Image (cartoon, grey):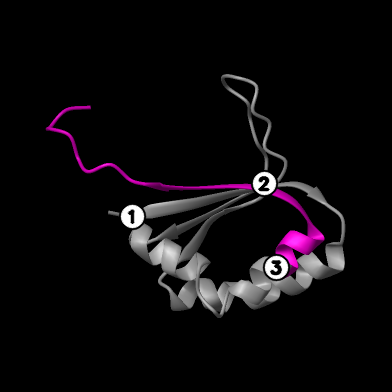
Amino acid sequence: MPAYCLFDNLKIDDYQKLERYKRATAPIVAKFGGRYVVLGGNVELKEGDWRPTFPVMIEFPTLKRANEWYDSEEYKPLKALRMSAGTYNAVFFEELPPQGTGA
């Protein structure tokens, strides 16, 4: 089942580092079968009080593949670069299998 990695860029302290991170990360995401689904944009709050600052969502074929990317040697130095550039929240979640035949 597909899996999604949701990152919320809460605070950016060093935009130059984050730009370097963004340029270098996309090819590694693709290598692990990932694709960007959301990269910032307008956010409309409909319920609750969560106010994403700059959401980024990446889809991977499976949760296993998402974790292989996140824990990979290729991504490790980029993850450190991102963490040194600001403050973030991140969650990974897996799509549920279809439940029956109705909406």
Q: What are the residue bounds of the magenta stretch?
A: 81-103
User: Label 3 to label 2, Cα distance in Å?
Assistant: 25 Å
Disc 3 packing (10 Å; few <14; some 14–19; many ≥20): few
User: Label 2 to label 1, Cα distance in Å?
Assistant: 23 Å
Which residue is disc 3 drawn over? 80
Q: Does the stretch in magenta take in 86?
A: yes
Depth check, mark 3 against mark 1: the one in front is 3
Residue at screen point 50% across, 53% down? 5
Depth check, mark 2 against mark 1: the one in front is 1
Residue kind at label 1, given as amino acid type: Pro
Depth check, mark 3 against mark 2: the one in front is 3
Does residue 48 appear left or right of residue 69 in this picture?
right
Q: Which comes sooner in the sequence, label 3 or label 1?
A: 1
Which residue is disc 1 drawn over? 2
In the drawing, what numbered circle is on residue 41?
2
Quadrant where the C terminus lies?
Answer: top left
Marks 2 and 3: in contact by CB < 8 Å? no
Residue kind at label 3, given as amino acid type: Ala
Marks 1 and 3: in contact by CB < 8 Å? no
Q: Is residue 53 above or below residue 87?
A: above
Q: Which comes sooner in the sequence, label 2 or label 1?
A: 1
Circle 1 SS class:
loop
Q: Of 55 and 73, which appears nearest the observer?
A: 73
In the drawing, what numbered circle is on residue 62?
none
Q: Residue furthest top?
A: 48
Circle 3 SS class:
helix
Q: How many marks?
A: 3
Residue at screen point 50% across, 74% down? 72
Residue kind at label 2, given as amino acid type: Gly
Q: Which comes sooner in the sequence, label 3 or label 2?
A: 2
Does residue 4 appear left or right of residue 75 in this picture?
left
